Image (spheres, rainbow, N blue to C red):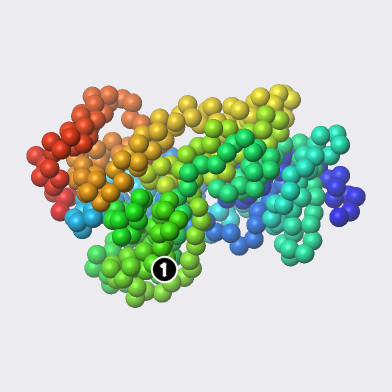
């Protein structure tokens, strides 16, 4: 290390170049701040790759990054019966390839003025004057570099090293361990559709979460998740591929990582460090959706850091979590309750999938997903759905024998 490296100082050092960190770096660089975006080499997170229209709008995502437009979801029960949930009108769910998508976000931050470096965060410390000091190993792994930072954003994933060292009071969120395989899209599998996501609720593929088959244009993501550390994720994916005919197509790559399913109770150290994305625990329970929430968390963290840099008020950092929970806390709570109960056994999953036949549930589910909020304008509809859920819990409704079966149910 040279003396110049030690004295080099940035307004913000963003550690982690996924959607959250890249978004924060881009926003702050656009504000004229001196930003360092530090990211590990060769990191691709296992992810279904789904993004809602609101993300496309809010974060100005160009069309060329969307490799598929999903028009329906198929929900598969333990009995193999399934429910198709079409998206009404011209709505869609965009699918992205994380390797391409994340790199585009990092390059956008660089083009906005952020400095990109490849390296792995090692330690957080302080100079005698109290300024944060970040030490990281360079790309070759043989050398280390040191920079100073007025503020730090830890966007380095579920097992955040920044959180452990700089915000230890944040604690840890419950995890689902996810694994998927990216394969070539099949040419002649009769039950595969390139504009449909398949979500499989079967204990053999996941005892407490779900498995998936998501289209990515010329590729497909096939994966599963579980909080059970003893569950064989790779074996489950192999079984799912065999059962669906995907064992005959070429495998492109395999990836696995923990995914948090609950926002941490504290995101900042009250001084100069704030967490964002998976490091803050902002992945939706039940669905495992994280890209939108990660990018929103990055933007809120950037806003909080900007306020701190402009005013010197460290309490500004707490605003990121407050704003996130005000808008999305109820959704996360509701999804957490759904996962804890309905994913608990195959018997309950069977009932859960049967509930998804209800046209009202389908409509409100898609509207909430597309807009990233509970549909507040229809309180009576929510009441009716709640009453149906309660009736199902009490055994008053028999799975697959609804009064309105609907043409999409099987």
Where is residue 263 shown, x and y percent of the image? 50, 37
Q: How many marks?
A: 1
Label 1: how many Cα within 10 Å (few below 14, some 14–19, many 20+): many
Q: Is residue 305 left or right of residue 90?
A: right
Image quadrant holding the N terminus, namely bottom right
Q: Is residue 130 left or right of residue 54?
A: right
Report if residue 37 is visible in the image: yes
Where is residue 171 shown, x and y percent of the image? 57, 38
Residue depicted at x 77% and y 42%: 125
Where is residue 268 shown, x and y percent of the image? 63, 33
Query: Element at badge 1?
Result: strand
- Residue 404, above or below 177: above
Q: Is residue 243 left or right of residue 97?
A: left
Residue depicted at x 37% and y 74%: 249
294 and 392: which one is in front? Answer: 392
327 and 354: which one is in front? Answer: 354
Residue depicted at x 86% and y 44%: 7
Q: Residue furthest right?
A: 3
Report if residue 215 is visible in the image: no
From the image, tell me which residue sits under label 1: 183
- Residue 95, above or below 380: below
Q: Is residue 49 left or right of residue 277?
A: left
Residue depicted at x 44% and y 31%: 329
Where is residue 388 shown, x and y percent of the image? 19, 33
């Amino acid at each position: 290390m040279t003396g110049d490296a030690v004295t080099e100082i940035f307004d913000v050092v963003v550690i982690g170049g996924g959607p959250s960190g890249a978004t924060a770096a881009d926003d702050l660089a656009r504000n004229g701040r001196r930003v360092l975006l530090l990211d590990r080499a060769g990191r691709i997170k296992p992810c279904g790759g789904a993004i809602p229209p609101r993300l496309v709008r809010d974060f100005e995502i160009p069309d060329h990054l969307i490799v598929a437009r999903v028009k329906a979801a198929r929900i598969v029960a333990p009995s193999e019966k399934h429910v198709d949930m079409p998206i009404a009108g011209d709505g869609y769910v965009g699918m992205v390839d994380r390797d391409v998508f994340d790199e585009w976000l990092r390059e956008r931050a660089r083009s906005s003025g952020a400095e990109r470096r490849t390296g792995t965060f090692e330690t957080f410390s302080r100079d005698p004057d109290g300024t944060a000091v970040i030490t990281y190993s360079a790309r070759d792994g043989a050398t280390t570099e040191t920079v100073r930072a007025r503020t730090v954003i830890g966007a380095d994933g579920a097992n955040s090293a920044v959180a452990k060292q700089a915000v230890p009071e944040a604690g840890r969120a419950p995890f689902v361990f996810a694994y998927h395989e990216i394969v070539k899209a099949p040419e002649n599998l009769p039950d595969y559709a390139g504009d449909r996501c398949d979500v499989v609720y079967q204990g053999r593929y996941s005892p407490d979460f779900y498995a998936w088959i998501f289209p990515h244009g010329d590729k497909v993501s096939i994966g599963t998740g579980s909080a059970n550390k003893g569950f064989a994720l790779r074996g489950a994916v192999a079984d799912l591929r065999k059962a669906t005919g995907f064992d005959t197509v070429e495998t492109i790559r395999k990836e696995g990582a923990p995914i948090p399913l609950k926002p941490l109770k504290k995101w900042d150290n009250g001084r100069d460090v704030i967490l964002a994305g998976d490091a803050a625990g902002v992945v939706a329970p039940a669905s495992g959706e994280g890209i939108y929430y990660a990018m929103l968390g990055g933007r809120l963290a950037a806003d909080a850091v900007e306020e701190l840099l402009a005013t010197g008020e460290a309490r500004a950092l707490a605003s990121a979590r407050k704003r996130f929970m005000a808008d999305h806390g109820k959704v996360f709570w509701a999804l957490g309750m759904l996962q804890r109960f309905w994913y608990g056994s195959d018997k309950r999953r069977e009932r859960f999938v049967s509930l998804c036949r209800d046209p009202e549930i389908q409509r409100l589910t898609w509207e909430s997903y597309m807009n990233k909020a509970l549909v507040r304008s229809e309180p009576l509809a929510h009441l009716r759905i709640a009453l149906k859920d309660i009736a199902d819990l009490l055994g008053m409704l028999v799975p697959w024998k609804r009064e309105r079966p609907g043409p999409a149910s099987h």
